[in-house]
Image (spheres, rainbow, N blue to C red):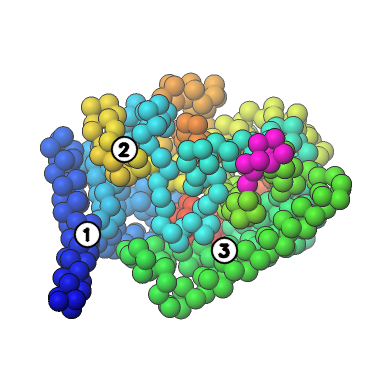
Amino acid sequence: MGLLILVGICVVLVISCVWKVLNWVWLKPKKLEKCLRQQGISGRPYKFLQGNVKDLASMMMEARSKPMELSHRIAARVIPFTNQGVEKYGKITFDWRGPKVRVNIMDPELIREVFSNKYHGFSKTKVNPYLKLIVTGLVSHDGDTWVKHRRIINPAFHIEKLKLMLPAFHTCCSELVSKWQKLVSGASCELDVWPEFQKLTADVISRAAFGNSYEQGGRIFQLQIQLAGLIMQAMQSVYIPGISWYLPTKQNNKRMKIEGEIQSLLTDMIKKREEAMKIGESCDNDLLGLLLESNLKEKNSKNVGMSINEVIDECKLFYFAGQETTSTLLVWTMIVLSMHLDWQDKARQEVLHLFGKDKPEFEGLNQLKTVTMILYEVLRLYPPVVVVTRTANRNVKIGEIYIPSGVEIGLPTLLLHHSHELWGEDADKFNPERFSEGISKATKNQVTFMPFGGGPRICIGQTFALLEAKMALVMILQNFSFQLSPTYIHAPCVVLTLQPQHGAQLILQKI
């Protein structure tokens, strides 16, 4: 009798597991697909378990296998799968990342509703667990946790605090300029500026975030690069919850080793800084010091500060967001100005008029108009993050569209920035003049320009990134002219952020 009961329980458990798996891989996706099609939304049909991942990976590999012409019409190469979907099915379409559906939206008014979150219907999309190793902290939180972290971190990014970091920006940029001057010993020199900018922005974030511990910060940067490569490999396949993460593969073993070293380095830095603060040493004016100071005040007043692991996550985010965003902005700015020498000349004239060969100060950087227009236009054509995602955390309606709970929303930043309907027939052309009267005028107050995201969750570090980019660009324009090398291959691609696949080979000349 007891054996029969045990067998019965086992049968029930097996049937329950089979039903859950069947619902996950087939019944729920087909129900969602029917719901979307009944609303007149078109998209790619669902394929068992894999969805459209195989097609996505195949199109990405094909696009990356060859370079493109020297133009800014990059969408078909960078996000061929999403680009083709929008072209074929319209401004609102859907596709499948495994059994999960993504509804891609190109309508500015609907995007505004998603960002406004007025009914709290959308939350940050739960990213692939591999991606959490780098994209973590504030950017991955929701609800009260996000509010708490944002409140604690905000003081570190106040403009008065950022001014105190300008000497760190200047020191790192001076080292870069000195190095380039030595390289350009003759009339000119060919240089791949992409790894140069990666190192520059890593140095900047190391000094700005960790002060005197910036050498350890540099080691973290190297480890993060290795980790990003492993993450991109892992994300080419379907993630199976509870299984993929723990498989004893070579990539997983390497990933765990790197993650462990990053965790150890950050823990050591944070504990040393906290001990120094306990014995009354003043807080350094770096991001880590400001964060720990603000966190201590939060703990003292409300006893709900961040744990050491939460502080570690925010430090990882400082690194990824602070380094990746600015390095990609700088490299594409240099490439674009090498393609449009007239605008390079205009920018240099403005820089020399404001600063001559003197050290750039905050007030002068704030007065740059042409340089700012150029940076905005580069961010439009080459946004660091090409797609922003959100997830419906309950059944919600935007416009006339019903979005069931759990559905992912894709906001294709790159396609939006290149839309002829929204930006005019010259949408794929480099025209900084469109920003001559500011962003609101250029966008006609629509949500069509979002290089740093949008809504309440807009990137907290955007001022930091733009200030750093201005400092670097000013000092380069003060000392060099540059043009594309014959060896340069135009091949934008996504490696977490939008990067030049084969580097950025330029010819530098001293001025």
Q: Which amino acid is tagged 1?
A: Lys
Measure the C-alpha gap from mark 1 to mark 3.
38 Å
Write down the residue under mark 2: 394
**Residue placed at 64% from the left, 43% from the top?**
305
Q: Which amino acid is tagged 2?
A: Arg
Q: Which amino acid is tagged 3?
A: Ile
**Residue placed at 53% from the left, 71% from the top?**
256
Kindly state the secondary structure of the residue where label 1 is placed. Answer: helix
Sequence order check, earlier mark of 2 and 3: 3
Q: Position of residue 387 (x, y in %)?
A: 40, 45
Residue 406 located left or right of residue 277:
left
Q: Which residues are magenta?
A: 298-306
Residue 155 located left or right of residue 57:
right
Q: Position of residue 361 (x, y in %)?
A: 78, 34
The answer to if 384 sits in the magenta stretch is no
Write down the residue under mark 1: 20
Confirm or deny contact between disc 2 and disc 1 (CB under 8 A): no
Asked if residue 363 shows in the view, the reply is yes
In this view, the mark in front (1 or 3): 1
- 125 over 301 or under it: above or below: below
Measure the C-alpha gap from mark 2 to mark 3.
36 Å
- 427 over 203 or under it: above or below: above
Kindly state the secondary structure of the residue where label 3 is placed. Answer: helix
Confirm or deny contact between disc 2 and disc 3 (CB under 8 A): no
Q: Position of residue 175 (x, y in %)?
A: 77, 55
Sequence order check, earlier mark of 2 and 1: 1
- 221 over 405 or under it: above or below: below
Query: Looking at the rendered structure, which numbered label has been put on residue 225?
Result: 3
In this view, the mark in front (2 or 1): 1
